[in-house]
Image: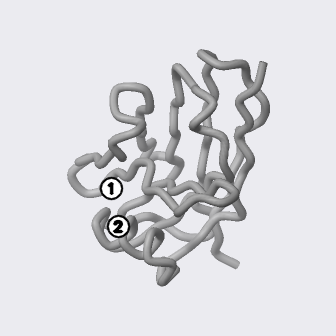
Amino acid sequence: QAHLVESGGGLVQPGGSLRLSCAASGFTLDSSVIGWFRQAPGKEREGVACISESDGKTFYGDSVKNRFTISLANANNTATLQMNSLSPEDPAVYYCATSWGCSRLISSAVRRHNDFNYLGQGTQVTVSS
């Protein structure tokens, strides 16, 4: 059965780094996009990052620009989100998803339409000293 497998996350001190991975299992990305959004308790969903399989174009949410980097390894259909300089504003459950465009993926997440092609199980990121 085709699905996304998320890994990474965990506990890190402020200023530290974490890496999230999202692997497509049973399907190929094939001209779609893959990205992450996050959900923290009591907060609105926020688009974090997205990358296009076809042209490598990326999108970053304003709060993570210059700190997070998304990349895609086409050979193994795996996206990686490198998160640096983590702050107390970053803790959340991070979900990866695929769609046909980054604008669509982010909009679907923020508006809670959830009409993704695939959605990962989510992984917790905690930032605490």
Q: Residue at x 38, y 52 (%)?
A: 50
- Would you name the residue on which mark 2 appears? 32
Question: Circle 2 sits in a helix, a strand or a loop, which is it?
Answer: loop
**Disc 1 or 2, which lies upstream in sequence?**
2
Residue 10: image location, x then y, percent: 77, 35
* Figure disc tally: 2
Going by the image, does 86 lie left or right of 115?
A: right
Q: Residues within 10 Å of mark 1 (few under 14, many from 20)?
A: many
What kind of element bears circle 1? loop
Nearer the observer, 107 or 98: 107
Mark 1 to mark 2 CA distance (whole Å): 6 Å
The answer to whether residue 54 is above or below residue 118 is above
| Residue 8: percent from left, percent from top | 71, 39
- Residue drawn where x is 63% and y is 31% of the image: 88
Quarter of image, res 63? top left
The quadrant the N terminus occupies is bottom right
Q: Which mark is residue 18?
A: none
**Quarter of the rendering containing residue 64:** top left
With respect to residue 83, does 116 lie above or below? below
The quadrant the C terminus occupies is top right
Q: Amino acid at mark 1?
A: Glu
**Circle 2: is it few (<14), some (14-19), or many (20+) Cα within 10 Å?**
some
In the image: residue 99, left or right of residue 117 = left
Determine which quarter of the picture holds residue 62.
Answer: top left
Mark 1 touches mark 2? (CB < 8 Å):
yes
Specify whether 56 is left or right of 112.
left
Residue drawn at x 57%, y 36% is 89
Residue in the image at 61% along x and 43% along y: 21
Q: Amino acid at mark 2?
A: Ser
**Where is residue 45 drawn, in percent x and y?**
52, 62
Q: Which residue is mark 1?
A: 53
Percent of width and height locating residue 46:
47, 57
